[in-house]
Image (cartoon, grey):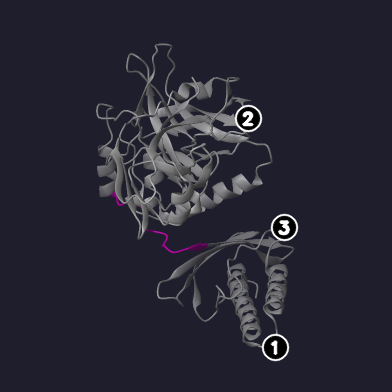
Amino acid sequence: MTNPEERVQAYIRDWHRSWQECGGTRAMSAASQANSLINQMETWQSSVQVLTKKHWCSGAADNSGSSFGSLPDHDPAAERITKHSVTDDSAIVETEFKRQSYPTFYEYRLKNENGNWRVETVMQFFDREEDQAFDDVKLKSLLARTGSASKLPPPELGDEPNCEVLFEDGKVVKGTLMQSAEAIMVSKVGRLSLPSGAIVARDFGYSPEDALPLSLKVKPGEYEVEVCSLEGRVAAIRVVFGASERKPFYYRQAVSVDGGSSHIGVDAGNVAICDALSFMKRSKRNHERESQAWIKKTTDRGGGSLDVTLLSLGDSVANTAVVSGSGYGDGCYPSYWVFDASDKLLAFVVDFQIAAEQLYRVVTIPWKSGASGMIFKDQGLAVEVQPSSGVTFKGERITEARWLTASGEVVPNSYHFASSHSDEQIYSVDFEMLNRSVATLEVKIHTGFRNNR
């Protein structure tokens, strides 16, 4: 067999057979009652090691995805080659796997090592190559809704962003969650291209089809990106549109075109700031490819380096996305537009709350033994005692309840009791213990945050 394309196709079929054999070994092990689970797993791991040695490039990690206890992800009877391209020393092969109720697609990138084809990477997709995150009509409609700053809401009541202090290099700050006071380090990480002037800001790991651009559109162009670092993490990131000394600066929430929250939800430890058109016009597969490219760049980065990556999305030549680590990790982080006193737009900023001082108020309520019914209702807080079920707290941003003795000693707090959460918090408390020793109930309520002045 001398045809390179035939050799590549034959190699992929051999790969499928190897996985089928590996799955068969696993099935026999699982069926064998004589072997312990540990022995079964050792047999499985051994067979995977043999497969890896046979098929993967030297130095490449096996990312084929199958795991102990599941059917093999590859099967020659169910996976067919749909497309391939071959050069002298590399090849790309695409397959469709129809064993499931819905098709799964794989993209194999192969390398020729000493005359033998070997796998560099395997990517799994659940969408076809032509599937777009947005059709042209919807994309055009969403971008048309971006515009001026006239309807941007102010920060939430109680919040004092003053994020400009996060970019004062050398300024010493101490946020609520920080271990100790520390000097800010500001770094310029590159330029972000915004050819459409519209921005998408979100966790880069999310599927792209529910992305929405921010409501404010900026002048198309390239802009400097800066990050604030504290405790070895990115504490804030901003895109700089201009400079000004005309204070006081003021902030507006960076809401999406549908008026959605300016707080960016994070489940994969990052926030991406992207040109909206470049992000939204890609195929779903390209989003997955670029997500994997971002992960590789992140994992290849040396220790001590900033967790910030610039990416060129789709067919862009310039960097149309910047992906940053999100401070302490997953959570929900506020984003703002920053203006000077003359309404000049200065920046878009995401605050990962490392330097933030969290603000609270405490409501003190007398605790009477044997009390029943509503014992407090005021200031957006209601507390009801129901001896048969527990204590119910109603109100926003309740973070903790503490029961104290007359001398101020904490008997228990709300973390000691099981609770159910919906629009209210219901704690199944030990009334006998509380009524024996408690004099006061304190309810701690989060009122906002501010960065160091």
Identity, as a three-letter code, of the amino acid under mark 2: Ser
Residue at numbered disc 2: 180
Q: Position of residue 264 (x, y in %)?
A: 41, 41
Can residue 435 be seen at all in this image of the molecule? yes
In the rendered image, the vertical position of residue 246 relative to residue 410, given as above or below: above
Q: Which residues are magenta?
A: 124-136
Specify the quadrant of the image occupied by residue 52: bottom right
Of mark 1 and mark 3, the one earlier in the sequence is: 1
Q: Residues within 10 Å of mark 1 (few under 14, many from 20)?
A: few
- Labels 1 & 2 near each other (Cβ < 8 A): no
In the rendered image, the vertical position of residue 435 relative to residue 158, given as above or below: below
- Local secondary structure at mark 3: loop
Give the quarter of the figure containing the N terminus: bottom right
Image-based side of 417 in relation to 147, left or right: right
Residue nearest the observer in this picture, 434 or 134 = 434
Identity, as a three-letter code, of the amino acid under mark 1: Ala
Specify the quadrant of the image occupied by residue 184: top right
- Local secondary structure at mark 2: loop
Image-based side of 65 in relation to 217, left or right: right
**Is residue 130 part of the magenta span, yes or no?**
yes
Residue drawn 64% across the image and 80% down it: 26
- The mark found on residue 59 in the picture is 3
Q: CA distance from mark 3 to mark 2?
A: 41 Å
Q: Position of residue 105 (x, y in %)?
A: 47, 67
- The mark found on residue 34 in the picture is 1
- Local secondary structure at mark 1: loop
Residue drawn 35% across the image and 18% down it: 344
Identity, as a three-letter code, of the amino acid under mark 3: Gly
Specify the quadrant of the image occupied by residue 44: bottom right
- Labels 1 & 3 near each other (Cβ < 8 A): no
Of mark 1 and mark 2, the one earlier in the sequence is: 1
Q: CA distance from mark 1 to mark 2?
A: 56 Å
